[in-house]
Image (cartoon, rainbow, N blue to C red):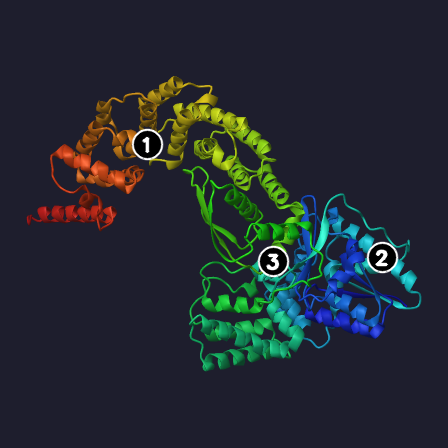
Amino acid sequence: MGAVFVGVRHHSPACARLVAATIEAQRPAYVLVEGPADFNGRLDELLLGHELPVALFSYSDEHASWSPFCDYSPEWVAITGARRCGAQVRFIDLPAWHEAFHAVGNRYADAELRYAEVVERLCREFAVDNVDVLWDHLFEGAAEPEGLAEYFDLLRGTVDADEGDSAREEYMARWVRAAVRAAGDRPVVVVTGGFHTAALKAKLDGDAEWPEVPERDRGASYLVPYSHARLDAFTGYQSGMPSPGYYQQVWETGARRAADWLVESVATRLRRRGQPVSTADLIAARTQAGALARLRGHEHPARTDVLDGLTSALISEDLSQPPPWTRRGTLRPGAHPALVEMVAALRGDKVGRLHPDTPAPPLVEAVRELLRTHELDREGEVALDLTDARALTRSRVLHRLRVLRIPGFERTSGPAEGAEPRLDERWTLTPVEGRLTALIEAAEHGATLEEAAGAVLTRRSRHAGLEQLAAVLFDAVLCGISTLSGHVEEALNEGVRETGDLAALGHVLSGVIGLWRHDRLFGVQQDPLLGAVIDTGTARVLWLVEGLHGGPAPADPHRLRAMAATRDAVRHAKAVLSLDAADVTGVATRVSDDGQAPPDLRGAALGLAWALGAKPDVRKVRGVEALGDWLAGLFAVAREEVLASQDLVGVLDELVSAMTEEEFLVALPALRLAFSYFPPGEREAIATAVLAHRGVAGSAGDVTRLQVDPVVVAEAMAVEKRVDAVLAKGGLA
């Protein structure tokens, strides 16, 4: 009998029905399906009794891909139909980890972009918006999808296969030839993407031996639960078909009832959100959908007929963005509520479940055991005292799960990179439907939780910038992973040595100093590589700031952070610095006296010298330009020293009091930034010193606890000044 080819569009109910009818009519000896051939020995796992959608997840070094199946996937229908009629089933495509798939994340993603020109021509000819609407118009609503082979032949005739497609087609053709020979006088049904069908038909002559399955050095394949949300093209997934919830209804009940379901589902969702949807609105939507279907030549309202009818009936104002079904894109923020609910209804909410006997990678059981052992397999809040060894171990388990992006483990507070250390953490544990899927997919990184988290951090570090490297190092410390720290620290040291970005350098230096200072908490034990980063970073900061010139500019909190980190390096890591405190103080003094340096940097330099023991000349403050920016720098680095200097507070009070109203309004944003470095109690202490300097009795608390935003007060002062000027000009003052 030979081969009977059924070219399909992946995730198409019409194609799934065609596959089922073909298998039922042919009663073949073999059913060959586009799928990973290395899974043939485990096909029984697919038929354990899962709740679809599920996906076959395959991974190897640096690559992972999914082969998703839902109830109406032609490939799934081919597998189940073959088993019912006693045919042998074989996947015939190259494994998903093969180099032919290196640019492919989803095996069953249709490749319309490769033949966009002919698709655009067909869309113009049939007056439709895109390939999805074209497909519905030609095939999905028809009782029999006539012309399907001609459609695929037309698409394939416009483009050449790339190297990956050619390799796959040659491999699949070998399976077809071998199956035809083995089947004798019985047919062989071949179910592949329609793009490949013509090429396979042309390759029926040649070697008829069963092909070998390529082997890999590392990697594995496992079934994972999937969901309609992950399948939907409207949420960014290139599935080949959007709106899986709607097509599930088409598969189960037919196009006419699916149209009614969509109207009712959208109405229900909108009413739950408090949006008014009347019976008259629904009647109008159905009427409009029916009229559009007749106008467009559809036997029953198609998906876009219903959506356009709903849009017409429910949305009266202009839309801020085109509906996603007209352009096959995701909804952007600010979309109309009706559009949001239409897309949600189309998507559906079905979530797959694996049969309990489904094999899982070692990581899944390893994590379950860790959660049980450390009492983290529950719901609720978890408080951890990080000075306790058992709590620190639990924290590391949770951080490793966080790094792997396993859902259901959210840290609400705890130590932060570059911040003062916290000795406690709080987490919220929540049961999440997608946790099993995430764990199976995380298994590509390793068989244990520590190994997998370490592999993810190493991968993050390979192409990371300076700040990202510091974040990776901090995550590694929180996870208790030391295997990658050497690599990351060496890369950090090199990046610190070469960078010209003072802001990034300050971020890194403050983070590394935090780890160095609190080694007992994090278990870093004053690592010598960390010390090398501190030494190199401190010298680099001083080299950069001494050459930084420029006129007055808003204070930059990021470079001020670098100056504060330099102060902390001298204070807390003096033993690893090649510079001594006198060298640092000398650079700081030169920068503070440099009239060409930015005001905030000059203030920070004076603060650095002061914090390291140099006595500042308070009289120099009187000649400072851009006082607010200068103070921001000073306070960022020498906050404690300022609080202890009554003389400086008095001079600052005199300078601010001497400002005109206009000068004060200009300086106000910088002054607010400067004083934001002081917590409320310290601001009150400064207010007390100011009152004492003026000889005024009263409560400093009343001065610092304004009920109105200072900016509002300043704006009111400006308005009053303009009113006074107008009155004076008119002789009414």
Amino acid of disc 1? Gly
Q: Is residue 659 visible?
A: no
Q: Is residue 88 visible?
A: yes
**Residue 618 at what x, y percent from top left?**
23, 24
**3 or 1: tag closer to the N-terminus:** 3
Q: Is residue 486 placed above or below 96 in the rendered structure?
A: above
Q: Residue at x 55, y 69 (%)?
A: 345
Q: Which mark is residue 48?
A: none
Q: Which residue is mark 1?
A: 633
Nearer-the-camera pick, 681 or 188: 681
Q: Is residue 37 left or right of residue 474?
A: right
Q: Which residue is mark 3?
A: 237
Q: Is residue 130 placed above or below 656 in the rendered structure?
A: below
**Residue 24 at what x, y percent from top left?**
81, 74
- The quarter of the picture where residue 242 lies is bottom right
**Residue 290 at what x, y percent from top left?**
57, 80
> Mark 1 falls on what kind of element?
helix
Q: Which residue is mark 2?
A: 175
Q: Is residue 554 placed above or below 163 in the rendered structure?
A: above
